[in-house]
Image (cartoon, rainbow, N blue to C red):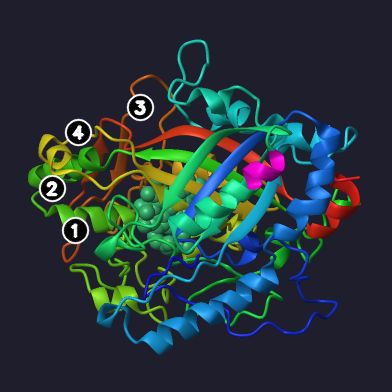
Amino acid sequence: MYNGVPNTPINVVAVPPPTPTSIDVDDVQGDVLVGLQKNSQTFMFFQINDVATFKTVLRADIARRLTMTRLVVAREFQVRDAKFRSGPVAAGKPAPLPLVGVNVGFTSAGIKKLVPDANLGDASFAAGASTQAKGLGDPVDGNGNLTTWLAPYTSGAIDGVLSVTGGDDDAVANEVTVIHGLLDPVVTFGPIEQGAVRPGEFRGHEHFGFSDGISQPAPSALGLIPFPGQQEVAAGFFVFGYDQSPATATRWMKNGSFMVFRRLKQLVPEFAAALQSAAGSLGTDADLLGARMMGRWKSGAPATLTPLQDDPAFGADATKNNDFDFSGDQVQRKCPYGAHIRKMNPRVDLTGKQADISPRRILRAGIPFGPELTDAESTSGSTTSERGLLFVCYQTSIANQFEFLQASWANNTGFVPGKTRPDETKAAVTVGFDPIIGQNGAGPARTRFTDEAVPNFPVGNTRTTFDQATDVVVPEGGVYLFVPSLTAIVTVLST
Ligand code: N7H
């Protein structure tokens, strides 16, 4: 994801001319593999009222406004060039380039309106995000109804999304106005979600304060030169029609991808208070505890390489900040097995048949939403204004990728399996929940623990857990979408 941050890796070095083995960069929408450039983003969810007119507008007007991968790659160079010419950002902030981007995706209901007999062969997509949410541990009442989801997301009335991105709010707002002009009242828009990178020194950091958008797989055949430690993963895990993608149920799925959207509220002062209070009783400090639970310090410096203190220069250095595989940290002295980044990408922790984690990788493209924390909220330790992450990821199997990460890794206290304590007992380690996104949906209590809240070196025989009485990330909605190729849009979905 480009988010305008000076330390954001620009990892596209060269795109080869299309060859039979290359990605069709003119046919894959731009957010999927590289990520639309976004300082600001509006998600315009919609319901189609008039299918025939919608198809006409889609083919005649929307299709040519779509931002495909080739343009996104070219814009990465434009951004780099602008930064280079204006010198270090701190020396004189360059005005953001407008770089308006538009992508479109459809839910299963939306696809069926356009192609009534369509079957995309993905059971999670067909069922939809709200049906699948209980299996992800989202809070439910005794009748199985989602209790934290906002009404528009449980209504089943969403057929698709137009996501509009750009260098600033005005650029995005102008394009949103154009889209309203084209599609009102052919569709009914809603919900509308607004995301934006955080201001000033927090740019590139999510609301808990951690630098985000560091570790992404490099899709093969796209011409990326991976950074040290960056895993190259077959493009077929992210886009249909390439090596390793599931057999496509429908020919026109080629160059398309499944998009998972989740509105995740973050309880920022509550998380800070939980870290502070646990740090007090564990005899450690809250920043160290936070870094161990994330697996990175706020700057992005990885705990496994800088275990005891933050190192902002390290965190900002894309040639170093992902160059580790936990092989030197097999007794979780530096980074707990349960840390968010280790749960989500355990690297060499998995052995045997599971050792190749390529089938579990996702491409993330989210953006924060909501206002900055106020002093009053910090002081009271209680959220009064909603803020969080508009989480987005791309994959070719929702069940094997996003849902598997959430349900079978983040929520699974036994994951990573097979670890033992470094002391003479050699007792099995129960890793616990992902302390950021893990959800204990087993009962109403939802309490969670994560093993080894403080470093256990040099003695290696002290055992502690970070216990959390409440969730700090609360799902408020979600949508599963298919982001089709341009070819599918103009030849199948709009005819
Ligand atoms: Fe996570 N955070 O900002 O606190 N995530 N995440 N995530 N996440 C990562 O490498 C965060 C969520 C992954 O390869 C970082 O970019 C927050 C969900 C994966 O090392 C930070 C939320 C899922 C990785 C965060 C959230 C994932 C990753 C480190 C929710 C999937 C890469 C910076 C509000 C189910 C792991 C970075 C790797 C990294 C945060 C959600 C997955 C700081 C706040 C729902 C795969």
**Which element carries disc 1, helix, strand or loop?**
helix
User: For the view shown, which residue lies furthest in the front direction?
Assistant: 181
* Contact check, label 2 and label 3, Cβ < 8 Å: no
In the image, 144: left or right of 414?
Answer: right
Q: Where ligand 1 lies, by quadrant?
A: bottom left
Q: Amino acid at mark 4?
A: Ser
- Residue 244, image x and y in percent? 76, 62
**Marking on residue 382:** 4
Q: Residues within 10 Å of mark 2 (few under 14, many from 20)?
A: many
Q: Disc 1 and disc 2: Cα gap in Å?
A: 9 Å
Vertical placement of 108 versus 457: above or below?
Answer: above
Apparent side of residue 333 relative to residue 243 in the rendered image (left or right): left
Quarter in which the C terminus is drawn: top right
For label 3, the crowd category at 10 Å Cα-Cα, with few meaning under 14, some 14 to 19 and many 20 or more, is some
Which of the 4 quarters of the picture holds residue 363? Answer: bottom right
Residue 130: x and y, percent?
59, 28
Residue type indicated by callout 2: Ala
Marks 1 and 2 close (CB-CB < 8 Å): yes
Q: Is 181 colored magenta in this rendering?
A: yes
Quadrant of the image occupied by residue 430: top left
- Comparing 495 with 346, the one in front is 495
Q: Given contact means CB atoms under 8 Å apart, are the residues at marks 1 and 3 in contact? A: no
Label placed on residue 361: none
Mark 3: amino acid: Arg
Residue that appears at 56% across and 67% down: 217
- Residue 411 in the image: x percent, y percent? 45, 39
Q: Which residues are magenta?
A: 179-183
The numbered dot on residue 446 is 3
Between the C-alphas of marks 4 and 3, the distance is: 19 Å
Query: Which residue is denoted by mark 1 in the rendering?
Result: 288
